[in-house]
Image (cartoon, rainbow, N blue to C red):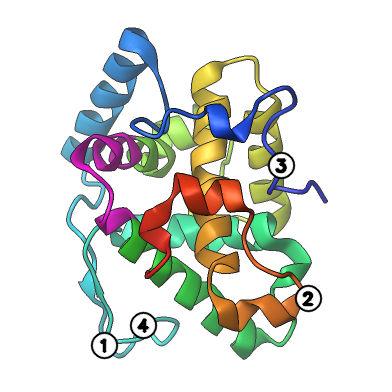
Amino acid sequence: MTDYLDPPEGQDPLSLNRRSFLRTGLGGALFLGTVSVTAGLSGCSTAPAGRLGAVETRMDARYQFRFLTTDDIDLFEALLPAILGSALPEQPNARRMVIAGTVERIDAGIHKFGPANQKELRQLFDLLNFGFTRITIARVWSSWPNATTEQANAFLERWRSSSIGLFNNGYMALTKISNVAFYGYQENWHLTGYPGPPEWAVQALPQFRDA
């Protein structure tokens, strides 16, 4: 499995503009903005998930989501097993709890970002959640709750190795916030004997220190 702590070949992680995850350029920004508006008009979830009901046993009902939508939660629940791989516990209940906690920390971290990064991430998530672009651009035919880890892994590999900058930077954004939310939580360090998140990741995303 690919080590998703590593940036695309030839890209220095410290070179990422801290004021912009995606660095889309005008064309990319217009494209993402159009997709985001279209996704909202088509019925994609646009409001933060808030407190999920007790029936949503995979999440802590006491936690209130302030950025991630229910669609975003489904997205990260599909991607995290591919991004984190063997770092996740094998036991199903423990695995669900670790994924749930990581998703909550992703939300808490993004909530502390500035408006510009939040806007870009919202557009990126809308791109991946909107059915048409999920199929045509991410090339994931199943909805995220039904996507397999193999499909999620193939999607990440395509975006990592793509010649399109928007996809490369989208890959970096997804894996970066996921890795920092997971490895930055001390209770998870024992899963792989990992001593802590890379310093470049902590410095780039200080919002996750206390998430």
Front-lying residue, 12 or 38: 12
Residue 62: give its label.
Answer: 1
Q: Which residues are magenta?
A: 110-123
Quick one: label 1 or label 3, which is nearer the N terminus?
Answer: 3
Residue matched to label 4? 56
Within 10 angstroms of label 2, few (less than 14), some, or many (20 or more) residues?
Answer: few
Q: Is residue 3 above or below residue 28?
A: below
Residue 113 counted in the magenta span: yes
Q: Secondary structure at mark 4?
A: loop
Q: Residue at x 45, y 82 (%)?
A: 58
Residue type of the residue flagged with mark 2: Gly
Residue matched to label 3? 6
Q: Is residue 177 above or below residue 38?
A: below
Q: How far is disc 1 from disc 3 in space, using C-alphas?
A: 34 Å
Residue matched to label 2? 193
Quick one: label 4 or label 1, which is nearer the N terminus?
Answer: 4
Q: Position of residue 35 (x, y in %)?
A: 30, 27
Image quarter of the C terminus? bottom left
Residue type of the residue flagged with mark 1: Arg
* Mark nearer the viewer, 4 or 1: 1
Q: How far is disc 2 from disc 1 in space, using C-alphas?
A: 30 Å
